[in-house]
Image (cartoon, helix red, strand yellow):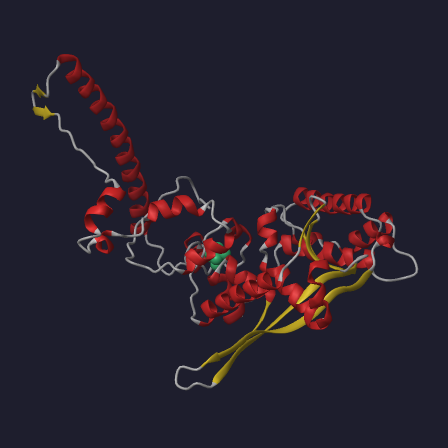
Amino acid sequence: MRLSYSALDTYRTCPLKYKFQEIDKIRTPKSKEAVFGTTIHSTMKFIHKPGILFPNLEQAMEFFSNAWNPAVFDSSEEERSAFSQGIKILENYYQKNNPADANIIDLESRFQITIGHAKPAASDRALQPETHIVSGIIDRIDKTPDGYEIIDYKTTRKMPTQEKVDQDIQLSIYLKAFLSRYPKEIANLDKITVSLYYLKHGVKLSSRRTPEQLQKSEDLFLDIIQLIESEKFAPNLSPLCDWCGYQNLCPMWKHKFKESRKIDSQTVNQAINEYIELKSAINITKDRLEKIQEEILRYMDQEGVSRVFGENGLIAQTLRKTYKYDEKRIREILEPLDKWENVLKVDGIALRNILAVLPLEAKEALDKAKIVDKETRGLTIKKGKNND
Ligand code: SF4
């Protein structure tokens, strides 16, 4: 399979978006965020392009203004705010960096590498090659006093944790691409830095890789390719949906777009409204029931009675006990009877509770170990007009 790093990244964000973009080849206009990112990237290239004199801040701002495309913004306020954000990025960059100090060996460096390995075929013992071609563009490669630095510029607001940068698959793939061009540098892996430069914050997050980490990233990459090949393209709702150009085709959103509805029946609209109203009524009733129950129980305690009588009937107090077992004791009893294995089962809630504190790698391994047991369709509500 041939794919670009950015396509793989799209799959990780949302498999359905990947399908629309890479398989169905449905083109959408570039989002304003993407246009902003491209303009900043081309300005960074202009700043560092080898020449006799590096451009100063004013020249960089002029380049940025000339490359600016106001047409993609929804309003002049939005456009003004984005433009001044771009100017701020450049000012901040020049405050922290002198372009003449960087020893850059390549800018916007295109690569194509082969990943994967030979695997035994099911039918015979011969090795079948299972390799894939991955392409991409590395924003910048610097020569540092003791090694190299691979830099990728980011224009997103959200910054990852250092732990995520240490396991970032994009940086590992870029490092592999660098090594395929400079194979001898594998001996100096500890001197090659990989960095994500968050331009809006003016912060560079850096990391290094061991050969084992590189291998793990490659394995993860191969796992994702396997998912793509098995044609798993479920939508993945996330805040990134706000920037997705496929909302009018996506089953999670398309109902919002009148033109894509096959049936715009009044009955469905009525059913939606009634469902929301009934659900709200249930919640109000539940809250009220809890309050009344508390009052009646308080009254029973006060009067020392277990049953109370009203005009429409009686209410009796019940006591439902839930138990938990002493695991050690249960094990001691069941193990000699060979029955312990029968009661062992993975506790999904406990697993979810520990997920947050597990390393990313373990989380991904657990995620892969999941199998669908039962699928139950339900409905959830978000109140308000045209919710997103
Ligand atoms: S709108 Fe969201 S869920 Fe739908 S395809 Fe786009 S990213 Fe995926």
Residue at image point 33% right, 54% down: 265
Most extreme residue toward the front is 336
Depth check, front residue: 240 or 136:
136
List x then y, in percent, for residue 266. 32, 50
Task: Tell me if 84 is positioned left or right of 75 in this view.
Answer: right
Res 278 → quadrant: top left
Which of the image's four quarters has the N terminus? bottom right
Res 338 → quadrant: bottom left
In the rendered image, the vertical position of residue 177 relative to residue 322, given as above or below: below
Depth check, front residue: 231 or 34:
231
Residue 265 visible in image: yes
Res 295 → quadrant: top left
List x then y, in percent, for residue 100. 87, 54
Task: Tell me if 120 is positioned left or right of 38 in this view.
Answer: left
Most extreme residue toward the top is 303
In the rendered image, the vertical position of residue 213 relative to residue 159, given as above or below: below
Residue 1 visible in image: no
Task: Tell me if 15 is positioned left or right of 292 in this view.
Answer: right
Residue at image point 83% right, 61% down: 49
List x then y, in percent, for residue 175. 66, 64
Depth check, front residue: 360 or 70:
360
List x then y, in percent, for residue 233. 44, 64
Q: How many marks?
A: 0
